[in-house]
Image: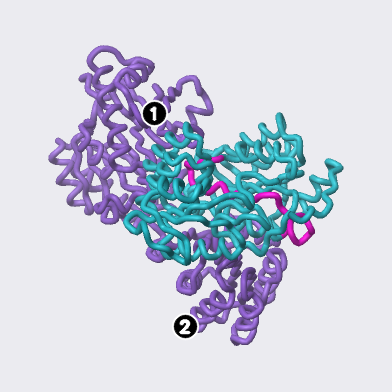
Chain colours: A cyan, B purple
């Protein structure tokens, strides 16, 4: 088992004919992801690499029974693409697009929240269930099937964490990059909740960064509800206040959103926090040892 | 993207929000002339991309045009250091001259994004003229907040509740309702991340006026507003940050001596953290983007080396899908082009990593390979130490 996606997920790629849309479609396919359709308005009817392209998501769903979308639509049309996937009744939309205007996302998020479609992203690396389904831009080879769930606001820092986990023999159940924007779909707590209920996830590694209060919220939720050991890393301990560190969300304003406060709250709530980005795998192992959980090599899926 | 106070006020005024009579000046003579127009008694306000100007001597009341000239001469070219600028301060290049107003009461109003609810949020307080964070700390009960439903927008009755909560009554209360509705309209139409009036005042004559304003635009929406790029005052930005912006690189100058190039914001922050852990001081934050390309890597390398504080360079690229040999090629080209002799440590991961390492080792550059993040950080700090610094 896993969360959000597995080998049975049928994927439609929105923006499949764009440069990065096509490139990553091919990469995901090479990993074994079941991509059944693409959508590019105006290009319905063609096939690209043998994948049928439709004008709308609704059409794609009608003909291929796709239930998950991966969005590579450029920023001006990306919020619309999210709304369209909600309208088509998909189970999940994963939006990779970076740079969507906030005003557009306020609207899209308000609609999506009340729909049956879950949203991951935007501005995220995507979701991967190792060995089964890769939905996004992450390098597949660093992942290993296993029992640690990973949830992160970052992209490449997640790769670093995953590699460290894999290197010490801790495979992953599912890795979810929730995205670095101020307005995103699923938040830490939404993903933690799924990991908590997933019988094949035995521990969780969480990667946060400066800005906002999502990590603190998650910390309190973990203390109240989480049945499995959690370890974490927070990037930006040394970040200067008031500066936007790359991600629109990563800014310390008015003394709020500091890494040290997040780390303290997490520690207080029983989460093992890696003191250095070089010890993320080690912190996970430490949390497992403290909980007395031994993860045996995951059965092959 | 930030703009000056005077630009923010002009925009607000375009949405029917009353502002004081004012002029912008670039020279002391222009300031004097403007002061004369205002009748001598006026307020001189230095325009910089930071708040806290009053306490730093950037806002002065004058009584004669000649006095305005003297104050302007002193301010122009001066580096104002406020609590928001950092120790290096920001240079004054533009001055706003405003009519002096007799103030009866001061308030705070703003609209910004609330991450928690994923909506815009109206914030108001009867404590105007002070930093809202300070009010939030000392007397949170004085802050009124309202998250705005994107489908209904801000409704008049909601704005009225806020105006009444501020203690306004009668005509001024209704004026305030209209002002708040216009503020929301401005926020949406101009794609603002934050629009703030502080203080919003009621004059002794009973008029509402936006005395000071701050506006920052959503960088992701700049493409929808052709006039925005021309509104940027480049004198307020670090020259290297400007160059980086042109190549779509996120660069922030820091105070140390190790230049950093990393792909991805989270990993870039973590890299700064790990350098400090090993006793190094980063010279910058630089994110070349999650999917670093050869061109971007080359440009980023040149930007890092333009900073004369940089004595060593640490490259940390988790290439993933990007090929490491291609990235190595980018580094070698850029380093050769600018004749870089500084010590470099490259930590790479991703496909074709061995080919990438081999290229670097055979390049003739002063380069070492970091096998892991920790190994790389340790090596660069050591190399810097050996260089005598």
User: Measured from the top left, where is residue B351 in percent x and y?
Assistant: 62, 72
Between tags 1 and 2, which lies in front?
1
Q: Secondary structure at mark 1?
A: loop
Chain designation of label 1: B
- Does residue B389 appear to the left or right of A245 in the view shown? right
**N-terminal label among 1 and 2:** 1
Give the camera-side residue of B102 and A89: A89
- Does residue A271 appear to the left or right of A114 in the view shown? right
Give the camera-side residue of B153 and B274: B153
Identity of the residue furthest to the left in this view: B37
Quadrant into which the C terminus of chain B falls: bottom right
Give the camera-side residue of B290 and B7: B290
Q: Secondary structure at mark 2?
A: helix
Q: Is A170 included in the stretch rendered in magenta?
A: yes
- Does residue A239 appear to the left or right of B153 in the view shown? right
Labels 1 and 2 share a subunit = yes
Residue at image location 31% in from the left, 23% down from the top: B155
Rendered image: mark on residue B148: 1
Residue B328 against residue B46 in the figure, above or below: below
Q: Identify residue for label 2.
A: B337
Which residue range is magenta in the image?
A: A164-186
User: Measured from the top left, where is residue B369 in percent x and y?
Assistant: 67, 75
Residue at image location 56% in from the left, 55% down from the top: A135
Q: Would you call the spot at circle 2 few (<14 residues within 10 Å), some (14-19), or many (20 or more)?
A: few
Identity of the residue furthest to the front in this view: A63
Q: CA distance from mark 1 to mark 2?
A: 53 Å
Quarter location, residue B364? bottom right
Give the camera-side residue of A159 and B14: A159
Residue at image location 36% in from the left, 56% down from the top: A44
User: Measured from the top left, where is residue B307 in percent x and y?
Assistant: 48, 69
Task: Give the mark count.
Answer: 2
Chain designation of label 2: B
């Amino acid at each position: 088992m896993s969360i959000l996606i597995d080998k049975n997920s049928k994927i439609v790629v929105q923006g499949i004919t764009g440069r990065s849309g096509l490139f990553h479609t091919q990469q995901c396919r090479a990993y074994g992801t079941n991509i059944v359709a693409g959508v590019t308005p105006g290009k319905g009817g063609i096939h690209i690499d043998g994948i049928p392209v439709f004008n709308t998501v609704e059409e794609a769903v009608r003909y291929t029974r796709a239930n998950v979308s991966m969005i590579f639509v450029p920023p001006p049309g990306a919020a619309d693409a999210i709304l369209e996937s909600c309208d088509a009744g998909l189970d999940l939309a994963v939006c990779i697009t970076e740079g969507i205007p906030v005003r557009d996302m306020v609207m899209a998020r308000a609609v999506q929240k009340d729909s049956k479609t879950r949203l991951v992203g935007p501005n995220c690396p995507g979701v991967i269930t190792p060995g089964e389904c890769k939905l996004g831009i992450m390098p597949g080879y660093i992942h290993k099937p296993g029992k640690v769930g990973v949830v992160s606001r970052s992209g490449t820092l997640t790769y670093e964490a995953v590699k460290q986990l894999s290197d010490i023999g801790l495979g992953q159940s599912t890795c979810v990059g929730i995205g670095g924007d101020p307005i995103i779909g699923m938040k830490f707590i939404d993903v933690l909740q799924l990991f908590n209920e997933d019988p094949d996830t035995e521990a969780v590694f969480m990667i946060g960064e400066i800005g906002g209060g999502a990590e603190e919220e998650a910390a309190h939720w973990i203390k109240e509800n989480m049945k499995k050991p959690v370890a974490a890393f927070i990037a930006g301990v040394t970040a200067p206040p008031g500066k936007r560190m790359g991600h629109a969300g990563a800014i310390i304003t008015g003394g709020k959103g500091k890494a040290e406060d997040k780390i303290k709250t997490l520690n207080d709530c029983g989460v093992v926090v890696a003191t250095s980005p070089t010890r993320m795998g080690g912190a996970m192992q430490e949390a497992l040892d403290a909980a007395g959980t031994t993860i045996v090599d995951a059965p092959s899926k | 993207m930030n703009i000056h106070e005077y630009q923010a006020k002009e925009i607000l005024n375009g949405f029917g929000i009353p502002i004081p009579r004012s002029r912008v000046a670039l020279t002391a003579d222009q300031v004097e002339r403007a002061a004369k127009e205002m009748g001598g008694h006026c307020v001189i306000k230095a325009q910089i991309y930071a708040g806290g100007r009053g306490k730093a001597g950037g806002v002065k009341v004058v009584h004669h045009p000649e006095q305005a000239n003297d104050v302007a001469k002193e301010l122009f070219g001066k580096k104002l250091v406020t609590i928001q600028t950092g120790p290096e301060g920001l240079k004054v290049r533009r001055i706003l001259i405003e009519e002096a107003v007799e103030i009866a009461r001061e308030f705070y109003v703003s609209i910004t994004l609330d991450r928690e609810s994923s909506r815009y949020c109206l914030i108001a307080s009867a404590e105007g003229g002070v930093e809202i964070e300070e009010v939030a700390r000392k007397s949170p009960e004085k802050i009124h907040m309202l998250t705005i439903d994107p489908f209904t927008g801000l409704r008049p009755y909601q704005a009225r509740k806020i105006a009444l909560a501020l203690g306004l009554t009668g005509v001024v209360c209704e004026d305030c309702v209209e002002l708040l509705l216009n503020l929301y309209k401005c926020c949406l139409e101009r794609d603002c991340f934050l629009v703030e009036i502080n203080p919003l005042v009621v004059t002794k004559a009973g008029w509402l006026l936006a005395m000071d304003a701050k506006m920052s635009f959503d960088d992701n929406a700049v493409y929808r507003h052709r006039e925005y790029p021309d509104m940027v005052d480049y004198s307020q930005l670090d020259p290297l940050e400007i160059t980086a912006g042109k190549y779509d690189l996120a660069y922030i100058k820091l105070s140390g001596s190790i230049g950093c190039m990393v792909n991805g914001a989270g990993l870039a922050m973590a890299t700064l953290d790990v350098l400090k852990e090993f006793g190094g001081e980063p010279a910058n934050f630089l994110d070349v983007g999650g999917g670093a390309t050869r061109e971007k890597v080359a440009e980023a390398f040149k930007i890092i080396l333009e900073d004369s504080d940089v004595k060593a360079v640490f490259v940390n690229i988790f290439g993933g899908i990007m090929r490491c040999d291609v990235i190595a090629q980018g580094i070698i080209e850029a380093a050769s082009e600018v004749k870089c002799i500084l010590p470099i440590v490259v930590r790479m991961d991703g496909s074709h990593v061995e080919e990438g390492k081999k290229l670097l080792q055979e390049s003739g550059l002063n380069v070492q390979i970091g096998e892991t993040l920790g190994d790389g950080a340790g090596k660069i700090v050591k190399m810097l130490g050996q260089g005598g610094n």
